[in-house]
Image (cartoon, helix red, strand yellow):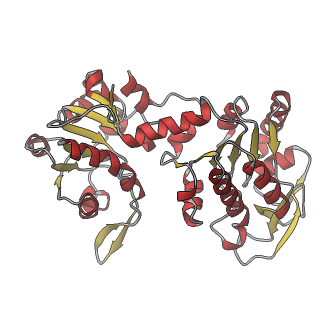
């Protein structure tokens, strides 16, 4: 398997699977990139290849086209932005397979970059079609997967295609390599104590990662909407807070397993409750197990913020996945901001901190802490599945 830090690919045509599934905005009938985070995260790989004297063929998906090409999902809209970021003209092929596309990639010279049209304009991509993957493989002498965000999908361009390249002609880009190495710092050999912070709406979405972390973590902090399922499972009154009634037994089982394994399970002592899901709603701070009828918990309270911050600031390894409340609303962001502050402070004192999951990443970006944590994962669902212990097809296929 190729490692970019050890292998030079000069005069090679390198086919790179990237994740340029970026949000677009429309202005005067033209689409523009609204957030280039995913593009920026892949630039180190692309610049390394260009510095080595390689030519690059980029392939990615964008959005969820229903049946064939749709203009609003065409990758031609990101070409100007990508060209500006790379500091050179990026050529565009109006298909990812077909004579024109193959002619364009075959004609590339060292230092040139070609972006193929949206992979998902072909249904065979998501079907993991082998014949389609073989066609895509014709675009490169070497294949690199640098799209961690899609590594959990067994699609043609992320997994199946690797089989058409010999082990010494395939590998990971710098982003994918960094994602795996940083995740393994938490899973494989963490410095202790390891504190895992898990938030979000539902227990059902996090149960597998909670169960896995019970074998790894010293402390698990629970926040967000799913904390009220735990509160009700323990006999609390939670008003009209979000509760998964069918997961009450699951919450009890998690609490019992934590006790058995000696893992500290921290639940919010208090909550900021509101009488409506609205930034202008009436609010009160109350015990998380004594929320009045007609009220709902929308953030952790001041006592919980203090307890959580103390645990985080004593950690040597930190995993954060999920917000503590409805941080998108200004009046319910204090809990998430307190956690972000504590993670940053602990990192400054030598802890390793990994932040992953769309809402957590959005939170550290919103509060200006992205540069003050050790690593911000681009993975989302892929990172979650990796921590759940699942085999990610996009990783397994390259490793062989």
Residue drawn 79% across the image and 48% down it: 229
Determine whether 14 is above or below 77 in the image. above
Number of residue marks? 0
Residue extending furthest toward the front: 349
Residue drawn 35% across the image and 39% down it: 173
Residue 37 appears at what percent x and percent y? 42, 58
Q: Nearer the viewer, residue 180 or 214?
A: 180
Residue 75 appears at what percent x and percent y? 27, 56
Does 138 sit left or right of 344 as displayed? left
User: Picture quarter containing residue 254?
Assistant: top right
Q: State whether residue 99 appears in this view.
A: yes
Residue 96 appears at what percent x and percent y? 21, 44
Determine whether 154 is above or below 371 in the image. above
Where is the C terminus found, in terms of image quarters? top left
Residue 103 appears at what percent x and percent y? 8, 42
Q: Nearer the viewer, residue 351 or 118?
A: 351
Residue drawn 7% across the image and 43% down it: 107
Determine whether 79 is above or below 386 in the image. below
Q: Nearer the viewer, residue 72 or 19?
A: 19
Q: State whether residue 71 appears in this view.
A: no
Determine whether 275 is above or below 67 in the image. below
Residue drawn 54% across the image and 62% down it: 365
Where is the N terminus found, in terms of image quarters? top left
């Amino acid at each position: 398997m190729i490692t970019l830090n050890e292998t030079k690919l000069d005069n090679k045509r390198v086919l790179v699977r990237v994740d340029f599934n970026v949000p677009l905005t429309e202005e005067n009938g033209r689409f523009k990139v609204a957030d280039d985070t995913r593009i920026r995260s892949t630039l180190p790989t692309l610049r390394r290849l260009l510095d080595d004297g390689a030519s690059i063929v980029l392939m990615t998906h964008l959005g969820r086209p229903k049946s064939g090409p749709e203009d609003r999902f065409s990758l031609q809209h990101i070409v100007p932005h990508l060209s500006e970021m790379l500091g050179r003209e990026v050529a565009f092929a109006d298909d990812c397979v077909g004579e024109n596309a193959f002619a364009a990639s075959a004609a590339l010279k060292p230092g040139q970059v070609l972006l193929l049209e949206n992979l998902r304009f072909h249904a065979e991509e998501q079907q993991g079609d082998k014949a389609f993957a073989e066609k895509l493989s014709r675009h490169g002498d070497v294949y690199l997967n640098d799209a961690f965000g899609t590594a959990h999908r067994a699609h043609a361009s992320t997994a199946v295609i690797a089989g058409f390249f010999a082990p010494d002609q395939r590998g990971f880009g710098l982003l994918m390599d960094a994602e795996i190495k940083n995740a393994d710092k938490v899973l494989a050999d963490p410095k202790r104590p390891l504190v895992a912070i898990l938030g979000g709406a539902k227990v059902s979405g996090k149960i597998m990662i909670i169960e896995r972390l019970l074998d790894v973590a010293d402390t698990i902090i629970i926040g967000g909407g799913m904390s009220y399922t735990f509160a009700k499972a323990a006999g609390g009154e939670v008003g009209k807070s979000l509760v998964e009634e069918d997961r009450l037994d699951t919450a009890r089982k998690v609490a019992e397993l934590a006790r058995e394994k000696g893992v500290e399970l921290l639940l919010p002592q208090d909550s900021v409750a509101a009488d409506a899901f609205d930034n202008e709603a009436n609010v009160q701070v109350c015990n998380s197990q004594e929320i009045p009828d007609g009220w709902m918990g929308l953030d952790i309270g001041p006592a919980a913020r203090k307890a959580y911050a103390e645990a985080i600031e004593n950690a040597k390894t930190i995993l954060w996945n999920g917000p503590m409340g409805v941080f998108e609303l200004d009046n319910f962001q204090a809990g998430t901001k307190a956690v972000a502050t504590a993670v940053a402070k602990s990192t400054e004192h030598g802890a390793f901190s990994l932040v992953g999951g769309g809402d957590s990443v959005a939170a550290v970006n919103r509060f200006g802490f992205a540069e003050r944590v050790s690593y911000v994962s681009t993975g989302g669902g892929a990172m979650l599945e990796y921590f759940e212990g699942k085999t990610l097809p996009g990783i397994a296929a390259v490793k062989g």
